[in-house]
């Protein structure tokens, strides 16, 4: 009888490139492939340690002299909407949500292009064509859903979401930039909190929060926000109390970072 031994994931580091969040910084990522029958377990385990998914890759910021980027999630049990957030929910009450399998459409891509052109014209995704967009949406080895938000006339927002064993992970979302009064970015997060509550899932993962970055500042507006820092999740507290200074000892060497990663049973 032949036995196949589980293979531990291999970790790699990207070449440095300009940081999209903080001017004058260089970013670098630690990453590993997400594939095979045990991909869901690996995704669950690493997501709890600050990793994020992009198609069939899990990655973690691992910059040489900066540790500003921190994975963020909302503890659903501690979330209470602000008065402003309640107004957002009320204004968007006419928006319907539909959860589907991750399958890209031209209508989604048209909204995606409109979003990029209006909000991120110079970002890393600015040149994505329909085929690359379809790959971003459809190439997922785990349980993912595509949340579409539409009124009676148009598609207004979309969110690609992974279903983890302890929550919903918002992989990527985009919306109609011309519907600014609806605050659709906030509304999609509020809706995911509601879905997590319905499913009995404790967390909604939002991606990275970066102190000093205006692009990421909105995440601090949600009560119950936690950040992954120093190997553990902790309440955000005062957003102004986080340092963004560059220092050569702010991050551990790559070998030490990999050694500290807790893998699911059978993958170590």
Image (cartoon, rainbow, N blue to C red):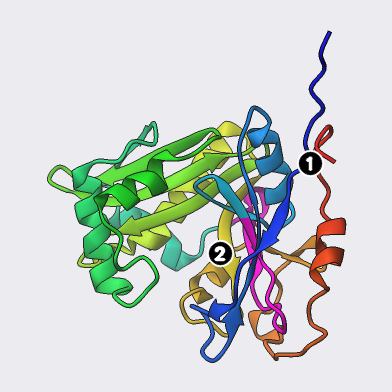
Where is residue 43? Give x, y as percent. Answer: 66, 42
Q: Residues within 10 Å of mark 2 (few under 14, many from 20)?
A: many
Residue 265 appearing in the image? yes
Asked where in the image residue 16 lies, by quadrant, the reply is bottom right
Is residue 62 magenta-colored? Answer: yes
Disc 2 target residue? 222
Magenta extent: 59-79
Front residue of this view, candidates 52 and 10 = 10
Q: Is 17 located above or below residue 98 in the figure?
A: below
Q: Does the magenta stretch include residue 47?
A: no
Spatial distance from mark 2 to mark 1, Cα to Cα? 36 Å
**Total tally of numbered discs in the picture:** 2
Question: 13 or 174, which lies in front?
Answer: 13
Please state if 100 lies on the left or on the right of 59 as rendered. left
Q: The N terminus appears in which quarter of the rendering?
A: top right
The picture places residue 263, in percent across and down from the top left corner, at: 81, 44
Comparing 187 with 109, the one in front is 109
Residue labelled with disc 1: 8
Name the quadrant containing residue 124: bottom left
Is the residue 267 above or below the residue 178 in the image? above
**Mark 2 vs mark 1: in front:** 1
């Amino acid at each position: 009888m032949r036995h196949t031994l589980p293979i531990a994931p291999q970790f790699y580091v990207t070449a440095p490139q300009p940081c999209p969040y903080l001017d004058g910084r260089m970013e670098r990522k630690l990453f590993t492939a997400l594939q095979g029958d045990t991909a869901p377990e690996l995704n669950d385990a690493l997501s709890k340690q600050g990793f994020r998914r992009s198609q069939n890759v899990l990655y973690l910021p691992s910059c040489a002299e900066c540790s500003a980027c921190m994975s963020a999630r909302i503890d659903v049990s501690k979330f209470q909407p602000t008065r402003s957030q309640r107004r957002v929910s009320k204004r968007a009450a006419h928006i319907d949500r539909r959860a589907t399998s991750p399958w890209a459409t031209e209508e989604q891509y048209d909204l995606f292009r409109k979003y990029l052109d209006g909000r991120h014209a110079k970002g890393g995704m600015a040149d994505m064509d329909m085929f690359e967009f379809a790959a971003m949406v459809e190439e997922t080895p785990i349980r993912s859903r595509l949340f579409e938000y539409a009124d009676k006339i148009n598609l207004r927002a979309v969110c690609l979401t992974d279903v983890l064993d302890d929550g919903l992970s918002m992989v990527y979302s985009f919306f109609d930039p011309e519907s600014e009064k609806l605050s659709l970015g906030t509304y999609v997060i509020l809706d995911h909190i509601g879905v997590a509550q319905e499913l009995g899932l404790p967390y909604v993962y939002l991606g990275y929060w970066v102190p000093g970055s205006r692009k990421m500042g909105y995440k601090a507006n949600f009560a119950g926000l936690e950040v992954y820092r120093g190997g553990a999740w902790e309440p955000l507290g005062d957003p102004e109390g986080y340092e963004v200074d560059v220092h050569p000892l702010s991050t551990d060497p790559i070998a030490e970072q990999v050694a500290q990663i807790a893998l699911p049973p059978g993958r170590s």
